[in-house]
Image: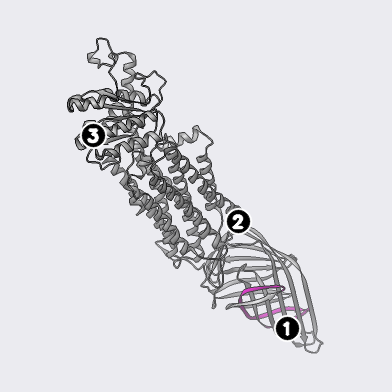
Amino acid sequence: MIIIAVLRQKTIKAFQKNTLIFSILLLVCAIISNIIITVSAGLITEESSFVYTKKIQAMFDIFMGIMMGAFVVSMAVPKIDSGRSLLRYLTERFPNAYFMYCLVMAIGLAGVLLTPVNVVVQTDGTYYFEFPEWFLFALFMVVLAVIIFIPVKMRTYLKKARPHKHIVQEAYMITLAVIGYALGEMFFEIILPSLSIDMRSIGFVIQISLVGMIAYAIRDKTFLQDLLIPVTEADLQTKKTYDLPGGYSYLVEEQTPSLCFEVFKDLVTHGNQGLCITRTMPEKVRSQYGLEKTPIIWLTRVADSPDTVRPYPVGKISETVQLFISAGRKTVVLLDGVEYLILHNDFKTVLTSLQDLNEYIAQNDSILILPVDPEAMEPKQFALLRRDLRMIEKPPRLRAPEESEEPATEDEETETFEVVGGREKAEVSEGGGHRQGLMLLVCSALAFSLVATSSSVVLARMSEPHFSEGDSWTYSAEMTEQSTIDMIGTIGMEILGENTIHVGSSSYSVIENQVSGEGTFSGTLLDMPVQGDWSMTGTEYWDTQSNERVGTSVISEMDGTVNTGMGLANLTISSTITIETEIVSDGWQHPIDVGQTGTVQVNLSYNLTVLIEIEGMGPMAIYDDVQAPSMINYECTEKTTITVEAGTYEVYVVEITNGDGSKEINFHLPEAGAGAWIERYDPSGEKIGDYTLKSFAYRGADEPAPTYLGLALEYWILIAVAGITIGILSIAWFLLKRKDEA
C-alpha cells in the first residue's frame, strides 16, 4: 500500500521521490526479513533466529533512517536535486547537520554489526538480551538523532515553504510515524527483551500501523509536488538584459511565445526563482532554453503527469502561483496560455483571477509575465487585460541572427553555447535518477552482505548450551587418585530435569545432572600394590543462567585387594565429595569466541571425606574442608578439529584455571553441549584425569543444523532474504525507469 502511494506521486523533483521510496523499501525489507526469520525460528536454533532478526532488521532500519534524512534534507535545501548535489552540499558546508546525523547512524550500524548479542533463554521459555552498555548508548544516540533531526528539518522546511494546511498536517503525520517507529524499535526490540519481556508481536502491530499512517499521509498523489520550494536556475554575474522592477505584471504582445521565454530565462539565470506555466511541453522548453532546475508546468486538459495542470478551474492555477510566490524570494512567473484559459473558462473569471494575482504580485515584490496574442481575443477584452499591465518590447540587439546586419557578437555566441550546454546537462540529469537508483540498489546489496557476514561470525561463536530432560553423555575415563592409583572405566551423565537449590544466601534455578561410573583400578597405596573395581554415583547442579556448576555431591566406592607383603587382604575405599559454589560475579558470558577471556568470582565450600579399610588393619580417615572465596579464570584459546570415539568434530579449546592452581582443558563440542575431550591437572601440573566422549544424545539449541546442497539452513535463509531485498529494490528501480522513460 505504501509503495503504491509513493509510486503514484507526482513531482518534478525526482531525487526527492527516489529517496522517499527507497527509505520505504528498506522499511519493507526490514519487515519481510523479520517475518521470514521469525517464522523460521523452529528450523534454526532459537538463539540464532533472535540474532538474525535483530541484526538484519536493525541494519535495514538504520539505512532507512539515513534515506529518510536525505528526503527531508532534499526538501529543506532546494538546490539538492540529485545524489551528486547532495554530496556537493555535504562537502561545501562541512560539517553540517546531515553529516553529523549520518555519522551517528554509521556508529550505530557498526555497533549492530560488531556487537555480540547474548540471548539467555530461561527455563520457563522466556528469554532476555544482554547488551554491552556502550552499544545501548550508541543505539540510544541513533534513536535520539532520528527524533530530533527529522522533525527539526521538517519544521524548518514547512516554515519556509508555507504549503497548504493539509500538506502541513500530512508532513507532520509522516514525521510522527517515523519517530514512533524509531521509539517502537528501541522499546519493543531492545528495552523490553533486555527485561525478559517479550511484546514483539504487539510492537509489530503498532509499527505496521505507523507504516500505514505514512501511506495515508501521502495518499494525495500531489503531496510531493506541493512540497516543492522555489529554486534559482543560476546566478550569473553578467548584466541582465531585462532588468525588470519587482512588484509588477508585464504583458508581451506576440503570436508565438518567444520574447517572453527570453525574458524569463534572463531573469531566472540572474538570481530570480522562476515558475513557468506554459502551453508548450516542458521537455521542449527545457531543451530549447536550457532550463534544468526551474519548475515548468504544462497547461493541458490531459493532466496525467507530475508537471501538468488543467486549465479549469482557473482558481487552481492562481492558487499554485500564490503558493510558489509565498514560498520563494525574488520570484518570477511566466503564465503562457491566457487565451487557452479564456477558452475553457469565461473571460470575466480569468480577468478577475489575473487582477487578484496582480495584487498579490505587487504585495510580494514579484514579477508576472503574460504573453498574449491580441488577434486571439476581442479588442475590448484585450484592452481590459492590458490596462493594469506594463509592456515589454524586444530590444533591437536581440533580433534573430538572420535579421541582423552585424555578425553575431561574442556575447550572443556565448548565450547560444549556454543553451546547448544546458540541453546536454538536462540529458545527463535525466539519466541521473536511474544511476542513482542503481547505486542505491548496489549499496543496499553490499550492506546486506556486511550484515550477513557479521551474522555468520556471531553464529560461528560457541553458543550457550541448553539442556533438557533425557540428554546424556558417555565418556571413557582415565583417572589418577593420590598420584599412585590409576582408574580406568566409563562415566555416564544424564539430565534428570530442572530443580531449585540454595547455596549460601542465594537461590538458583538449576539443571540436575545424574553422574554414574564404573571400572577397574590398579596401583599402590602406602607403597603396597592394589587392584580392584570402582564405582561412583552422584549429582551435579548447573545454574541455568550462567551454566556454572553450583553444587556437586559424589560418592565413590573402591573394592579390591591389597598385597601387604604377607598375602592379599581385602581393600575398601569410600569417599564422599560435596562442593557448593555461590556465584558472586560472572564474567564468562556466551556466545564465546576464540581469544575471549573471563573470570567468575565465587564463594567456595569444599568438603572431602575418605575412609580406607584394609583387612587386618585399623581404618584410616582423611578429611579436607575448605570455605573461602575463589576465582575461576576462563580462556578460549583456539578452534580446532579432534577425533574421539564419538566421531570427528570441530571444537573450541577452553582453559579453566581454578583458584588453587588446578586446571581443566575442555575441548567443547557445541553439537553435544559438553566437552568432547576433557583433561584435568592438579595444582602441580600433573594430569589427574582424561575423558573422551564415546556417545551422546543432546537435543539442545546447538544440535547440528540441517544442510541442503552443502549449506546450512541459516545460510539459505540469508540468501532468501538477500534475494527478496534485491528483488524488491530491482523492481522498484525498473518501475521508476519505465515511468521516467514514458
Q: Is residue 283 above or below residue 215?
A: above
Q: Is residue 66 above or below residue 318?
A: below
In reply to whether residue 506 is colored magenta, the answer given is yes
For label 3, the residue is 348
Tell me the crowding category of disc 2: few under 14, some 14 to 19, or many 20 or more residues within 10 angstroms, Cα based: few
In reply to whether residue 264 is colored magenta, the answer given is no
Identity, as a three-letter code, of the amino acid under mark 1: Ser
Q: Is residue 419 above or below residue 33?
A: above
Residue range corresponding to the magenta coloring: 504-533
For label 1, the residue is 574
Decide which of tag 3 and tag 2 comes sooner along the chain: 2
Distance from Cα at disc 3 to Cα at disc 2: 73 Å
> Percent x, y for residue 523?
72, 78
Q: Secondary structure at mark 3?
A: helix
The N terminus: image quadrant: bottom left
**Picture disc at residue 453:** none
Tell me the crowding category of disc 1: few under 14, some 14 to 19, or many 20 or more residues within 10 angstroms, Cα based: some
The C terminus: image quadrant: top left
Decide which of tag 2 and tag 1 comes sooner along the chain: 2
